[in-house]
Amino acid sequence: MAVERTLSIIKPDATARNITGKINTFFEDAGLKIVAQRRVRLTREQAEGFYAVHKERAFFDELCEYMCSGPAVVQVLEGESAIAKNREIMGATNPANADEGTIRKALGQNVQENSVHGSDSPENAAIEISYFFSTCEVVG
Ligand code: CMP
């Protein structure tokens, strides 16, 4: 196993319900360390750039609108196999299909307002971390 870093976003549905601390507890209880964190209000352009990979999907416009609808918290999580571990902690994209004990099962509202985002591969983690943070802002 290797120590990795992954990009996490606590989404607007979660900031609206004031549960960012509750979500961070899931990460910390699982042994992931928050090594960078910033509360942001994404612009439409930032949201479209971040989710560019989903540009052709039917939900793209709605997704970008939602991601700009309120504050989000962008974070870097660090730990052993952090990318896979974070995806395990988050649970399935659709909270209806997420396992018990996961963030999305406990706190997600629907397939779009699913409370958290996490990078899905080492390549995307590197791209997504650098989208929001410079090297000196990540302090392990
Ligand atoms: P995330 O893990 O951030 O990756 C892409 C996001 O698109 C996803 O979480 C959801 O917020 C959203 N999403 C995925 N599938 C759908 C869908 N079928 N309808 C609406 N939004 C979706």
Image: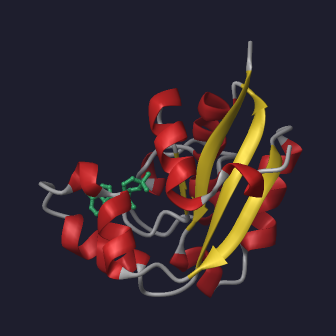
Q: Residue 57: name its quadrant.
A: bottom left
In the image, taking residue 61 as reference, residue 137 lies left or right, namely: right
Q: Residue at x 65, y 47 (%)?
A: 102
Q: How many marks?
A: 0
Query: Which residue lies at the image location 75% right of the left edge and 58% below the top edge?
Result: 137
Q: Residue at x 57, y 83 (%)?
A: 71
Splitting the image into four quadrants, where does ligand 1 fall? bottom left
The answer to whether residue 124 is visible is yes
Residue 23 in view, yes or no? no
Q: Nearer the viewer, residue 96 or 23?
A: 23
Residue 140 locus on image (x, y percent): 86, 43
Quick check: 14 left or right of 21? left
Residue at 73%, 46% in the rendered image: 77
Whole-percent x, y for residue 122 in the image: 53, 28
At which x and y percent is residue 79? 79, 32
Q: Is residue 98 left or right of residue 112?
A: right
Q: Residue furthest top?
A: 1
Is the N terminus in the top left, top right, bottom left or bottom right quadrant? top right
> Relative to residue 114, is residue 129 drawn left or right?
right
Estimate the x, y position of residue 5 in percent, counting from the top left. Answer: 68, 37
User: What coloring was used for the rendering?
Assistant: secondary structure
Out of 92 and 135, give the one closest to the viewer.
Answer: 135
Q: Nearer the viewer, residue 58 or 44?
A: 44
Q: Using the image, determine if residue 9 lies above or below residue 84.
A: below
